[in-house]
Image: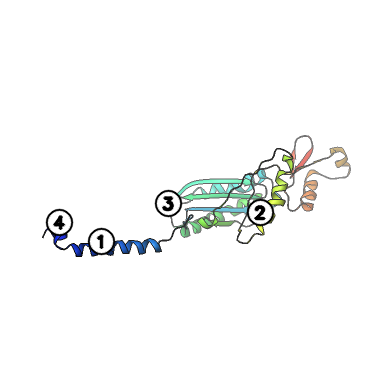
Amino acid sequence: MRLPEFAVRRRHTVIMIFLVIALMGTISLAKLNIDLLPEIEPPAISVLVPYPGATASDVESDVTKYLEDELNALNNLDKLTSLSKDNLAMVTCKFDWGTNLNVASNDVRDKLDLAKTDVHKHAPDAEEPIIFKFFSATAPIMAVSVTATESYKQLYYLVDKKISDPLKRVKGVGAIMIYGGLRRQINVEFDKKRLAGYGLGVPQIIQALASENVDMPAGDVKMGSQINFA
């Protein structure tokens, strides 16, 4: 019996089949989960190395460079990016899709063990590396841009103290990060002759400034016999 003939002779059966299919589709649609940010696991691992009291240039030359040299040899590595900031080095390893991140994490740890010797040699105050795997739950849900026509120099302070701090206390907020803006910088100038008269050197000045400002990078020596620290 052909299908058209069966459909004509057994029309009630065909109607019941279509009703069952429609019912199953309706039930499936009602139970289907819909998520604006579905949970996915991008093949990326970041390595963070805190380096208290170091400037971005010191972080780049003493920490980031050696991390890149070792992590570049990882298996299934697609792209390697790095970011050197005051007090922090961050290297992100993006792997090919389908890479097992658990295995990749072990490979990253092995490479970090090789890099620790050079890092501790050039940056003895650098802290232990932190391995961070990306998840969709850690992605930012909101990005806000703040501009000002007046008091631009105070904009970073206002955003940090008047906007960021109150939002951090809101229930459910995991983290808030601030990018850009002008941050306060203090220039310390000194007389080399008077410094020599007291039997002091530049490293001692840097050490004294760093000890009194543990939360701020210090010791970036500039031309003209002055020390800048933010």
Which amino acid type corresponds to the residue marked 2 in the rendered image? Ala
Residue lying furthest left in this view?
A: 1
Q: Residues within 10 Å of mark 3 (few under 14, many from 20)?
A: some
Label 3 near label 1: C-beta < 8 Å?
no
Task: Name the residue carrying label 2.
Answer: 126
Residue 156 quadrant: top right
Q: How far apart are marks 4 and 1 (CA)?
A: 15 Å
- 186 or 61, nearer to the observer: 186
In the rendered structure, which disc, 3 or 2, sits on the residue that comes first in sequence?
Answer: 3
Task: Name the residue carrying label 4.
Answer: 4
Which amino acid type corresponds to the residue marked 1 in the rendered image? Phe
Q: Quadrant of the C terminus?
A: top right
Task: Name the residue carrying label 1.
Answer: 18
Q: How far apart are marks 1 and 3 (CA)?
A: 40 Å
Front: mark 1 or 3: 1
Which amino acid type corresponds to the residue marked 3 in the rendered image? Trp
